[in-house]
Amino acid sequence: MDKKPVWLRKRIALNNDNISMVRGLIEASSLHSVCQSAKCPNIFECFSKKTATLMLMGDICTRNCRFCGVESGKPLPLDPGEPYNTAAAIRKMGLKYAVITSVTRDDLEDGGAGHFAKTVENIKELNPGIRVECLVPDFRKKTSNLEILLRKKPDVLNHNIETVEKNYKDIRNKADYGFSLGLLKEAKRLKPGIYTKSGFMLGLGEDKTGIIQLLKDLKEADCDIITIGQYLRPSDDNIEVSKYYTPGEFEEIKKIAESMGFKAVVSGAFVRSSYHAREALEEVIKKGI
């Protein structure tokens, strides 16, 4: 299913000076962004607004999920200057809300949790008053590694469930559905005041029953914020799109999620994990929940 429907044609006003600035800053700081590495459809919109989701620990992932556009293979050693450089880049962009993520690093004993923690520490030191959202891998499926990061008090802990449970064996076989749910729940147990967040894609062969069960599982894991987007095939090497969901279907699924009591639900074809992340959290805070 390669032909995209009309609602996936995106027209936005761009500020090319801002796009050039963000690209140049990322390159000059020897950093990576998930916007570029994962071929995000929102890249120009976000860069145009002088924002980006910076990706730690290189741009080579130790896993090879069939839906992902990030390159897989043997990654390079960690850059000890990256935590500070990330914090400095965020300051130059003037962000009040920063989202940082990473590739999965199964080659590291702590899965990269210590590097994440150092980055959060540097960001908060250089950017007083900033809120930090960490979109994390599963840290080698060890909750003790998660605790390393939580000690630095990120404001939002985001861990994507990505897809329904039945798809894990085929397209996400190195991950564990149950552990990912448990990671979200454990974050709340360790830091009761933290906001937790997760996201998943549609168009990977799921059905409505599976979607509803996934939402129930996330609610059981005490997840606060949900993002739901359309899977778009990054390359011919990735799994094909099984279905393009209509705007009406995204709205229907959003209403189902809201009826379950999630604090914020962001649902739409172009929604990604960090898309309008600041606005989602502000919605939760405004509601006082």
Image: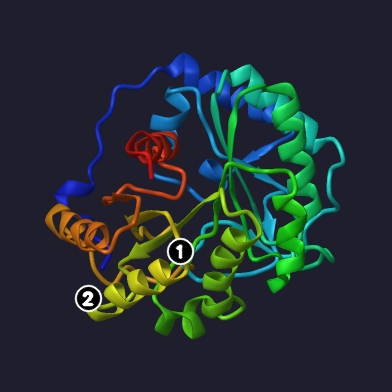
- Mark nearest the camera among 1 and 2 is 1
Q: Is residue 88 left or right of residue 203?
A: right
Q: Quadrant of residue 200?
A: bottom left
Between 287 and 27, the one nearer to me in the picture: 287
Tell me, yes or no, if residue 29 can be seen here.
no
Q: Is 247 above or below relative to 50?
A: below
Mark 2 nearby-residue class (10 Å; few <14, some 14–19, many ≥20): few
Residue at horizontal 38 percent and vertical 31 percent from the top: 45
Secondary-structure class at tag 2: helix
Residue 201 image label: none
State the colouring used for the structure image.
Answer: rainbow
Between 80 and 132, the one nearer to me in the picture: 132
Question: In the image as oriented, which residue stretches furthest toward the top?
Answer: 17
Q: What's the distance in space between the residues labelled 1 and 2, CA to CA? A: 21 Å
Q: Is residue 28 left or right of residue 279?
A: right
Task: Report which residue position mark 2 lands on.
Answer: 208
